[in-house]
Amino acid sequence: MKLRKITTVVDDVHREGEQPVDPVARTAVVLAVVENPWAGQGFVTDLGPLIDEIAPRLGELLAPKVAEALDAPIEAYGKAAIVGLDGEIEHGSALIHTLKFGDHFRKVANATTLLPAVEKRAPAGTVFDIPLKHVTDATIRSHHQTVEVRVPDAPRPDEIIVGLAAAAQGRPHARLASLSTEQ
């Protein structure tokens, strides 16, 4: 794994809808910019060997960093990959859609649900939205939220951004009824 940089974004919301938010609503995102090991090779049929090599290392690197940045119990989480223009979306998916990556975050977050994800191919500086869901019950609507991030100089055409996002709470002032009220 060739790591170029790690970017950490922490966002604290103090007011929402002209109302104070107490406690402050915090989200954290940690993004690793790595060389795309499949870029420039044409169509690679078997991505498995490099998935096995890289995905666990990325999960092990990022999961504790996002927990540390959040500095609170994780209630909502998500993952993301943006592939540079010389790669395929499948390259990003290969790294984040494996238990070898995601289980590191599940363990740190004491989570049981699937990690919501976003992946796409895009040039450097593209904004992307990482969806978040509750760590143990994906039907809890208050925790359905999105965190927006970007890395101005990444991904370069031969890179992939892989990221994890966490929230210490649901949306500020969430007021939607429980999903069970509609069933």
Image (cartoon, rainbow, N blue to C red):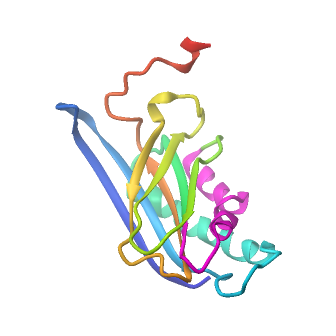
In the displayed structure, 169 sits above or below 54; it is above
Q: Is residue 102 left or right of residue 48?
A: left
Front-most of residues 94 and 157: 157
Residue 25: % across, % down: 32, 41
Residue 100 forms part of the magenta stretch: yes
Q: Is residue 29 left or right of residue 77?
A: left
Residue 103: % across, % down: 67, 55
- Which residue is rendered at x = 59% and y = 34% of the image? 138
Residue 120 forms part of the magenta stretch: no
- Which residue is rendered at x = 33% and y = 57% of the image? 10
**The N terminus appears in which quarter of the rendering?**
bottom right
In this view, the residue farthest toward the left is 18
Residue 34: % across, % down: 54, 79
**The C terminus appears in which quarter of the rendering?**
top right
- Which residue is rendered at x = 44% and y = 30% of the image? 142
In the displayed structure, 176 sits above or below 4; it is above
Residue 12: % across, % down: 28, 48
Q: Which residues are magenta?
A: 82-110
Q: Is residue 119 left or right of residue 127?
A: right
Provide the major secondary structure of the magenta segment. Answer: helix
